Structure formats: structure tokens, C-alpha cells
Amino acid sequence: MRIFDPHIHMTSRTTDDYERMAAAGITAIVEPAFWLGQPRTSVGSFTDYFDSLVGWEPFRASQFGVRHHATIALNPKEANDPRCREVLELLPRYLEKDGVVAVGEVGYDSMTPEEDEVFAAQLALAIDHELPALVHTPHRDKARGTERTLAVVAESGIDPGRVVVDHLNEVTVGLVRDSGCWLAFSIYPDTKMSPPRMVKILREYGLERMLVNSAADWGRSDPLLTRTTADAMLAAGFAEDDVDRVLWRNPVEFYGQSGRLDLSDAGEKEATFAGNSILRGGS
Amino acid sequence: MTTLDGLRTAVPAAGWLGEALERVTGDPAAIGKLFPAVGRRVGRDELVDVPGWSADEAARAQLLAALPADRIAAEMDGLYRYGDAAEKRAVLKALPLLPIADEAVPLLRDAIRTNDTRLVAAALGPYARHLDEAAWRQAVLKCVFMGIPLSNVDKLDERADAELAIMLGGLVEERRAAGRDMAPDALALLDRLKGL
């Protein structure tokens, strides 16, 4: 079974996670730029973070046979801090990188005027750089936040087929489905979405434009819940091809719209360095 | 040694690259947007005629060389600072081919501080002649420690000295005490340094 986790924050995870993910078939991932739990207070800590998403983290992933891509943005929470706002001017540099397959996570946290402005500006960047957009929906006041999100997306002029709206649930799935945007669900141990509920949603709404992710980060989360959901789909009577569609072909189709998705070495450990093993000996 | 002419023959300035080189010659700041796109435009295949170089690296070196001499240092700093791993590596590998003195030494030091084997190795090419002996020895030792083949180190035998032999000897002792192996190329170097 091959699995593509379209939303996971590997910066916060250990090499044990990479090993377990690769063993479970999770050989392609996208890491969206988000916040780190501890608020940032300067542009420099953003650029160091972005550097890691296009440098160190893909290198680390490659050691375990996991292909890493990223999305880059100023996240909605930190859009509210004027000390972080200047990072918008640096985003164009990062949005040109090979490993960057979307603008994200953008969207709303507390639905402030600052968030309105930064969200719209970054959808415009997505259009400029010919990239899809990954949109986070707020965890509080979610239904109204999702409605407002879809209105901003429509107003921006971006093709809804190049937008994924994330962290959906039973209450918001219908809204997004009708918008033409892609639908993403974050499977969590306690909150957001669970594997059995996810299976039920797939039964009801079908597999088209559906993405399933673990959104694993520094909080209580589990990088293997994409695999658990795949197993739950099979147990519920979905075919292997259905699982492959939701957990591999759909994310490939969505992020493939960037023209930069390169999965040629997914599943292969980065074993050669100028003809020699880089894993030999080591530290 | 790899030369710009060798790279130009291997990756000719035609099509996208030809236009990009023209743009950079006329408008040096244009390199900021062109440089990250190189891999997607010219490909990333290893070059048969230029061992150790890939097509994107060769094209990036040509773009850097197309900059007016008085702009190289400033543009190169920005491209490295905001570069992804492939761009950083390309800047490091291009350094010995550019008309610069020792102003890029901070880039080498940055690369050697990383834990990315590809960057550490790329920092130890011919431009590493500008590194002082202490920094160079530490970098060579780090290669052995990280498992980077010493064939990546330019002028290894010329520069390796008694002090490096002491440092390598210490690592061998630690590895042996732990029941671990040392890479054969490092042991061979240590052998060659005996008697210094």
C-alpha cells in the first residue's frame, strides 16, 4: 500500500516517526508551513523555518525513503502580529523553490481584519506564482469561518480546483463540496476527525476531491493515522483501488497542479552520494 | 579541474538557459527569480563529461558567471542565503570558477556548520583553499565523522598535516573502543600521514 500524507509537520517529529511511516507505506508527504506552538516574534525565525522546509527537512526525510515537499505562507495566527507581517515580502523568494508545491497554510484563525488582508494577499501570490493553495479552517467558530473562507476564495479569482480547504468535519464538508474546492480531513487521536467518521464521510460524499491527512505536529497527534484510515476503509468494504485513489492519486493530482511535484524517488532511500553511501558510518 | 568552458560544453547556452544568461547580463537582479527555476528548466541529470556535476549545477554556475564582476558577491550572498539545498550546493560548487577573492568564505563556514552531507562536501572543493588550516582540518574530520567520502576533499594529501593525523587518530581510537569501524579512506589517509 502506498500512502501520500498531504499535510504533516515533520519538523516536530522524530526519526522514529520517519521509520515507522516508511514501514507503513507513507513514502510521500507535504509539510505546510504553520506556527510552532511558541509564537514567533521576528521575520528571521520565519526564514530560518522556511529554509528548513526546503533544505534540511527534505534531506532528513530522504534518509528514510520519504519524499518531502512543502507549502510556504504566513499562517493565519501569526498574521495578527505586526512584527511578523514583513515576511510577506520574502515569500516570493520561497514560492519559486522546486520543493514548494502550494501556498499555505493560509486562511483564518480568529477572523480578524489582519487575517482578511493577509489571506487575500496570499491567494494573489498563489495566482502570481501559479501555485495551488492550502487553506486552514479555524478550529473555533468553524462553520462560519468556513463560509467566510469560501467567500474570500471566490473573490480572489483563483480556480477553486486549485484550492484545498482543510480540517473539515461533518458540519463543513457539504459547504466545501459545493464550492468546487478540494476537501481535506485531518485524522487526530481525539479531536478533528477519526478514522471511523472519515470512512462514513467517504461513503456519503464519495472519493472525488477528497484528501486525508494526519496533520501530525507538536501536539498530541499520530503520523500513522493515514494508514489507520486506509485500513479502516478496507475493513469497511472499500476496494484497494479506492484507498489508492484517496491516499495517493488524489494528493498527487492536487499538488501535481504546481508542476513541481517530483515523486521519482519516493520509497527509495537517498543511498548514494557521488557514488558512495551517505549512510555509511555516520555520526 | 572543472572549468566554466567544460560546463558550457556540457550544458550549452541554448533555449531557456540562453535567454536566462542574456537577461542576467543585462539585468543582474533578474538572477533572483531565474536561479531557483533552473532544475525545472534544464533538468538535474548527472553530467557524463563532467564527473560530480549535474545539469542544474552547471547551468547555475553559468548564471553566476554571467553577472557583472562587481555584482557577484552581493547576488551570490542572497542566492545562497535564500537558496534551497540544491541552490546552496550549486553556489558552493561554482565558487572556484568565479572572479572573486576570499569574500565567500562565510558561505563555506555556513555550509560546514550544517548537518547536510551534500553541503559539507560541496564546501570542500578547490575554493576551500581560502579556509584557514584549523577550519579545514575540522571540516575534513567532520567528513570522516559524517561518512562523506574523502575523494570530495580538494588537495587532501597536499594539505593534510600532522595535526590532522592526531585528530584522525583520536577518532580511530574512539571508534575502536566502541567496537565501530572507521571508513577505509580515512584509515588510508592516516596511513599516508604516518611519520609526519
Image (spheres, helix red, strand yellow):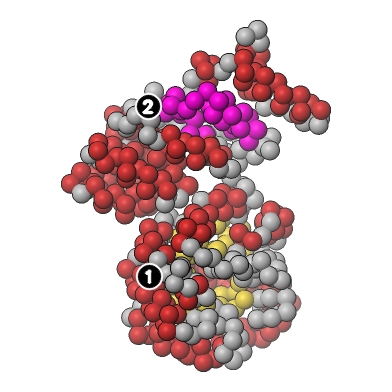
Element carrying mark 1: helix
Quarter the C terminus of chain B occupies: top right
Residue B125 position (above or below residue B74) = above
Image location of residue A162, percent across then percent down: 42, 74
Q: Is residue B141 magenta?
A: yes
Q: Chain of mark 2?
A: B
Amino acid type, residue under disc 2 in the picture:
Thr
Q: Is residue A157 above or below residue B102?
A: below
Q: Note whether A51 is above or below A7 in the view shown.
A: above
The chain containing the residue under callout 1 comes to: A
Q: In this rendering, would A165 be left or right of B138?
A: left
Tell if the residue under mark 1 belongs to the same chain as the one under mark 2.
no
Q: Could you say which disc has been placed on residue A126 in the image? A: 1
Question: Can residue B120 be found in the magenta stretch?
Answer: no
Farthest residue toward the top? B195
Residue placed at 24% from the left, 47% from the top? B28
Indicate the position of residue A6 as horizontal and vertical percent values.
56, 68
Q: Amino acid at mark 1?
A: Ala
Q: Which range is magenta? A: B121-150
Magenta segment's dominant SS is helix
Measure how far apart labels 1 and 2 are at the Cα level.
39 Å
Q: Nearer the viewer, residue A274 or B110?
A: B110
Q: Which residue is mark 2?
A: B2
Q: Residues within 10 Å of mark 1 (few under 14, many from 20)?
A: many
Q: Residues within 10 Å of mark 2 (few under 14, many from 20)?
A: some
For the residue pair A25 and B28, the one nearer the viewer reads as B28
> Where residue B171 appears, x then y in whole percent?
71, 26
Q: Is residue A199 visible?
A: no
For the residue pair A72 and A38, the one nearer the viewer reads as: A38
Q: Dot 2 lies on which element? A: loop
Residue, x 32% and y 45% (percent of image)?
B75
